[in-house]
Image (tube, helix red, strand yellow):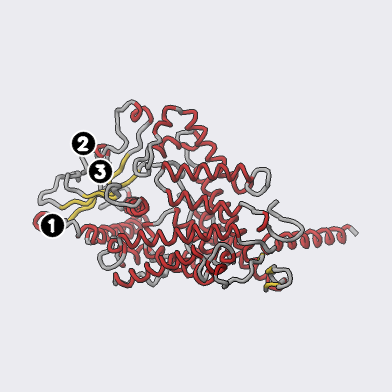
Amino acid sequence: MINPQDGVGDCRPAYRKWLLGLVLVHCMGVLAEPLFFFSRSDFQSGPEFFGLRRSMAPYVDWMYLDHGYFFFAPNPGPSHLVAIQSKVPEPPRASSLRGDAIVFPNRNEHWPRLLYHRYFMLSEFYNNSFAPTALSQQDKSDRMFVERWESDRRFYEVLQRSISKSAFVGKRAMQGADGLGVELLRLERPLPGPEEILKGVRRLGDSRELIVLPEGPEPAVEPLGAGVP
Amino acid sequence: MKGFGLTRFLTRWWTEFWESLEGFFFQPSGALVLAWIRIATGGMIAYIHLVWLLSLESFFGPAALLDHEAISMLHRNAWKWTYLDGRESLWFACVHELFALGAGLAMAFGCWTRWVTPLAWFLTLMTAHRLAPFLFGLDQIVLMLAMYLSVSHSGDRWSLDRQFGLVRTESKHWRNTLATRLIQLHLCVIYFFGGLGKARGWMWWDGTAMWFAAASYEYQSMDLTWIGRYPTLGSILTHVTLFWEIAYAALVWPRLTRPWILAIALLVHAGIAIFFGMITFGLMMIVANLAFVTWPEQEPTGPENLAA
């Protein structure tokens, strides 16, 4: 391919149209996920983008092109953490965070920053995968919704089991009182307004601001004052 | 006569379009900028795998945070094959990660670059499919760059291959142009959809997004909450980010606007690196933007540079 006379590597004209064809297919693969992602609504996905995404699924998935590029979008939102604590024989009705809980991500423990960010992504993923323990009466009337919930719930329980039995938990010898095991809590850190921070009403990293998110269909309880070590 | 004129016009248009397209993708160009991108990407690949190794037991093996069952369920409807899934051996994962780290280093140093670059990409991809829930923008950018660098002759400059004579002469090559164009186009897609995503959120319109990003404790690496004292500044920065991101795909091509677009890219990503704790991600986005930097000695040969 390289012309030794002028030191220029030219592409043979006969190859060019084939290569351009491959480039076109690849570019469609790059566009397939964001187009599909953006065209989704509660009613449908854009049929042409859905078709493109589905037809290119093996290529897009395996080549790791399945991204919507939603960085800090649509809005910067609250962060989510995961707390792991030993179960107690008589748990309170609403889960609460105890002093012996381990929480991830934890910038004091997870270093370097990239490792911290890995745990942070896992805690966000765990929260995004949440499916409640039960459905409300109204939701139960929709058969498709129930099927979707059953599938999501199964996955969420698998995640809980996997994290609970991991070396991350085992190393800390958290088997719970009387061998009851551990429980996972989802925590949310709400985003404060500028005045609260600038006037000193709230401190940005104050663990007492963390909200314990419920595992059932009931609304979140805000146990202000639950300290994290 | 009219029909004949239209046919001739269309034929000529198509010929010119095709020639432009061929020139855009295949006019040979040098490897200097791609070599810089290769060094940074290879170094980052090595660092990524080093960090996986630091906490290997949490990510791989029978006691991983996400075990085989969880990953299988997650990927049940996706084409995400990796030989790391289903293997419970920590040793196997350790060897894989060490190989990947080595491939990243070899890529950075330009050692057997043409074989090692696709190898580093493949090994990182295998890890990515096994550890998908732990990944973020950094992995997307690194894998994107490594994939396109695999096409190029980036080892022709700043490499051990060059030093030890594996590459005898540095020539301009169409593969360098193709790799550069693919990086450029992919970056445009990333920014365009990144901007459109932000345009859906009200915080990016009322100017509070900068504050709420600064107030996210989990991201914070340096205190930026002082920006709350200057709401107009915060709002301007929010809107500049939004409009820059949407306009990037259009304004990065003309030479008149390119330096400004790249300067904003540098500031935005340096800000992300310094204030939002994503040093690695910010750095790699700056590196990816180098694809738009043209060096006199590496410009495509031929009568015209279509990017101009």
Amino acid type, residue under disc 1 in the picture: Leu
Q: Residue at x 52, y 40 (%)?
A: B241
Q: Residue at x 42, y 62 (%)?
A: B46
Residue ranking furthest to the left: A178
Q: Under tag 3, what secondary structure? A: strand
The residue at which mark 1 appears reads as: A180
Mark with earlier residue (3, 2): 3
Mark with earlier residue (1, 3): 1
Q: Residues within 10 Å of mark 1 (few under 14, many from 20)?
A: few
Residue ranking furthest to the top: A199
Q: Residues within 10 Å of mark 2 (few under 14, many from 20)?
A: few
Q: Is residue B160 above or below residue B276?
A: below
Q: Residues within 10 Å of mark 3 (few under 14, many from 20)?
A: many
The residue at which mark 2 appears reads as: A225
Q: Nearer the viewer, mark 3 or mark 2?
A: 2
Choose top left, top right, bottom left or bottom right for residue A176. Answer: bottom left
The residue at which mark 3 appears reads as: A212
Q: Determine if marks 1 and 3 fall on one subunit.
A: yes
Disc 1/disc 3 C-alpha distance (Å): 21 Å
